[in-house]
Image (cartoon, grey):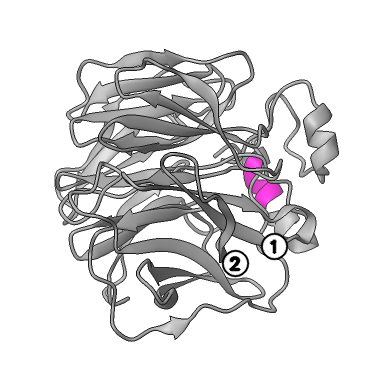
Amino acid sequence: MPQSRLVCWRVCAVVGVAAIVASVVVLLSAGSAASSTLARPPRALYYETAVGAASYAIDELNLSAPKVSTQVVDVGTASLFGIAVGGPYVYWSTERGVRARGAIMRASLTGKHVRRVVPGLRSADSVIAVHGYVYWADRDAIGRVALDGSHLQRHLIDLTPDQDDAVADGLASDGTYLYFSRCDDNTIGRADLDGNNVDEALISLGAKSCPQGLAVTRTHIYWTQLGSGTIGRARLNGRDVDGRWLNIHSRQGPFQVVADRAHVYWTWGGVDGSPSYTGRADANRSHLDRRFLADSLYPMALSDRKPKRRVTPIAFHSYPAPRAAPLRVASTPAVAREESVATLAALERPQRRR
């Protein structure tokens, strides 16, 4: 992550200003889960939430009634960019900090055995798990590593960095291909899971579309568009593109998106200290619930693994406003900027979360 975005994340967090304008996709995987498409209906949603003024955790929401959640792992003050579930583990990506570079972290689904799987990443962003591997987008390449930490490939797919030193914003997989979004190019690309046959523009969108979060099902790919208040959808072959497939009725997002055959979920809110939520709608766009889950921050993932039995009912927290999303700014000095939603909308070039 360029230093300007890193500074903005930290300063905005201190002053409580949420200049949130984009997303990192968080998806799930094979072995037990998937946005690489799930083999079974999802049983749980994993998400980041605040557990104190500057402390965060990954929680697990049981998607069956009654809607209850339980904490999986306390991540402390770490800034998360992505969450994925693979086998008996939950994985997350963290940003580069003062004392350490970015990393891919791992813990058991019981919250134990926390370890750093991939250290020394320049800008660990989106992360997914599929077919025994964890994939992530770093500043100069898309990498992967086996679930047990072996077979590390930091440069599985080398792409030309855009002007903000990023090669991809969102990642997703249907179990056959790896999909990636590129904001500056307004495109969604595709490659084989082994990194071959790269097509950087499977889907070309309109100017300033800035696709961010990605999700896939057996038939469609979904993406969030920066500051549009809409989720786009297309067929997996790149046809039938609809950049405004779903209106979430808020300009505060959508940021991230995950999906299964029955539902689409997205994160939104949190601007200027306002509450943050996960919304949900049926795959046919009916039954739109903008506040399906409260106090959920930006990363999330679906899983078909059975949730843990010991649960705590979901409740609204009284903690201070959630950490602000880092602001992706092109061609600006390395100085944190406090921008309102109206100011961001007026900028000539889109801003985005990284």
Q: Which residue is mark 2?
A: 295
Mark 2 or 1 closer to N-term?
A: 1
Q: Is residue 128 above or below residue 219?
A: below
- Residue 264 is labelled as none
Magenta segment includes 133: no
Quick check: can you spot residue 197?
yes
206, above or below 63, in the image: above
Name the amino acid, label 1: Pro
Q: Nearer the viewer, residue 116 or 348?
A: 348
Type of residue at label 2? Answer: Asp
Q: Which residue is mark 1?
A: 275
Image mark count: 2
Residue at image position (41%, 42%) is: 283
Q: Residue at x 28, y 36 (%)?
A: 173
The local secondary structure at tag 2 comes to loop
Q: Determine crowd level at label 2: few under 14, some 14-19, many 20+ residues with C-alpha closer than 10 A.
A: many
Does 35 appear above or below 227? Answer: below
Contact, mark 2 vs mark 1 (Cβ under 8 Å): yes
Judge whether residue 93 can be spotted in this image: no
Give the alpha-carbon distance from disc 2 to disc 1, as whole Å.
Answer: 7 Å
Tell whether 173 sits left or right of 252.
Answer: left
Q: Position of residue 43 (x, y in %)?
A: 29, 63
Range of residues picked out in magenta: 5-9
Q: Main secondary structure of the magenta part?
A: helix
Position of residue 171 measured from the top left corner of the image (x, y, whole percent): 38, 36
**Residue 343 percent across, percent down from the top left:** 85, 36
Q: Position of residue 327 (x, y in %)?
A: 67, 41
Front-most of residues 105 and 269: 269
**Alpha-carbon neighbours of circle 1 within 10 Å: few (<14), some, or many (≥20)?**
some
Q: Secondary structure at mark 1?
A: loop
Q: Is residue 265 left or right of residue 147?
A: right
The N terminus - image quarter: top right
